[in-house]
Image (cartoon, rainbow, N blue to C red):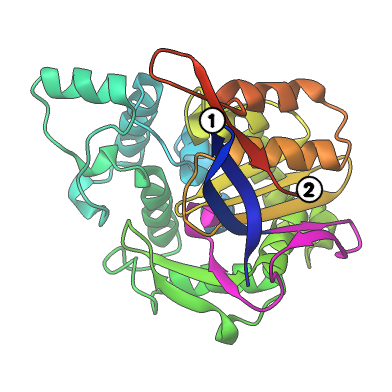
């Protein structure tokens, strides 16, 4: 069962309640805080699974082989928003890899952020698969398949060897049996899995404690992914997004997913956090994460302040007048 994690008041009266789940683990894999049921109910990762889905392509030598930049490698973990720096990196990556855009199975899209979308449409450009939020991840899938001599056809099918490997990687990191995982197709058309929130937090703990991985090779891959995401915070989402704020903190790996899922882990403290807002809203993320960081007495106060800059606890009218407040219930 979920529990109330936020309340919104207007004029002093309760207007909305938001339920959800939160799980925080320490370095010993122990739950040090939780809200809601976090050990039984499977939660789909959605795009929070992208760092895990990137493990296969990071287990290749394509960066050196094709002279791929750090920003271009970060696209394999990204939910890109169509800013100019995203478009340039995507065009460069697909050209270096010599893939045809029609090979991507994700749907055609405009840039997601408002300003580049308006500019894109005004220039008379049409929707493209390369502009899809998950295009970078799909290019990583194609790259791995080709480098390993696998068919690039059907790379999004559950039984494709790439997807089978991703499921095995998820089993290792989450320590949850793959046979028990929920499974479905994500919005971009590839498999996505669900595990209990504790196991989701555990999978992110491995990125800040890569020595927990079962081999030196896996440890190296997890470090590469951590460092690549850290080096390119705006590529992972875009400016003024939660992922960007958190990844600018050199101590944090973080990635959000659709329908209210968010995962992060703290390197120095060896703490991981997974949360799910039951309604699926992402609007509460900055406030919930800021309050969680305060609760665990996180030392980088600038990160907390920057999260509040993304969304204030104050509810404003269209003219900027304070008309209510959001309270996070931890």
Residue farthest along the left direction in this orientation: 124
Q: CA distance from mark 2 to mark 1?
A: 43 Å
Can residue 173 be seen here? The reply is no
Q: Which x, y percent locates residue 40? A: 67, 79
Q: Secondary structure at mark 1?
A: loop
Queried whether the magenta region covers residue 42, the answer comes back as yes
Q: Secondary structure at mark 2?
A: helix
Give the quarter of the image for residue 291. Answer: top right
What residue does disc 1 label? 11
Q: Residue at x 32, y 56 (%)?
A: 188
233 sits to left or right of 202: left
Return the residue nearer the eye: 267 or 196.
196
Q: Residue at x 89, y 56 (%)?
A: 27
Q: Residue at x 53, y 60 (%)?
A: 278
149 lies above or below 268 = below
Q: Which x, y percent locates residue 47? A: 48, 52
**Disc with the residue nearer the chain's start (2 vs 1):** 1
Segment tinted magenta in the rendering = 22-50
| Number of the front mark, 2 or 1 | 1
Neighbor class of circle 1 (other Cα within 10 Å; few <14, some 14-19, many 20+) is few
Q: Which x, y percent locates residue 3? A: 65, 62
98 sits to left or right of 239: left
Q: Which x, y percent locates residue 174? A: 69, 68
What residue does disc 2 label? 208
Can residue 105 be seen here? The reply is yes
191 sits to left or right of 73: left
């Amino acid at each position: 069962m979920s529990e109330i994690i936020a309340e919104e008041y207007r004029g002093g009266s309760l207007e909305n309640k938001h339920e959800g789940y939160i799980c925080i683990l320490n370095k010993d894999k122990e739950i040090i805080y939780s809200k809601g049921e976090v050990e039984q109910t499977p939660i789909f990762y959605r795009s929070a699974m992208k760092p895990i889905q990137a493990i296969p392509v990071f287990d290749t030598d394509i960066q050196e082989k094709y002279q791929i930049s750090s920003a271009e490698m970060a696209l394999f973990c990204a939910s890109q928003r169509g800013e100019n720096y995203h478009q340039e990196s995507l065009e460069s990556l697909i050209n270096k890899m010599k893939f045809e855009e029609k090979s991507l199975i994700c749907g055609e899209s405009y840039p997601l952020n408002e300003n580049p979308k308006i500019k894109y449409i005004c220039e008379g450009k049409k929707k493209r698969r390369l502009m899809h939020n998950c295009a970078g991840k799909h290019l990583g899938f194609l790259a791995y398949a080709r480098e390993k001599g696998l068919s690039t056809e059907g790379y999004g099918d559950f039984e494709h060897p790439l997807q089978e490997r991703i499921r095995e990687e998820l089993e290792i990191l989450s320590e949850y049996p793959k046979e028990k995982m929920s499974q479905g197709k994500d919005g971009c058309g590839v498999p996505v899995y669900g595990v209990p929130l504790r196991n989701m937090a555990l999978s992110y703990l491995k990125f800040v404690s890569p020595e927990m991985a079962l081999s030196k090779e896996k440890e190296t891959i997890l470090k590469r992914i951590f460092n690549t995401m850290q080096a390119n915070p705006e590529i992972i989402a875009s400016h003024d997004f939660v992922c960007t704020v958190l990844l600018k903190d050199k101590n944090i790996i973080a990635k959000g997913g659709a329908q209210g899922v968010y995962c992060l882990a703290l390197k120095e403290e060896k703490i991981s956090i997974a949360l799910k807002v039951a309604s699926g809203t992402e609007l509460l993320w900055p406030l919930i994460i800021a309050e969680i960081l305060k609760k665990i007495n996180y030392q980088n106060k600038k990160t907390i302040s920057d999260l509040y800059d993304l969304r204030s606890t104050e509810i404003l009218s269209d003219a900027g007048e304070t008309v209510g407040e959001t309270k996070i219930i931890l």
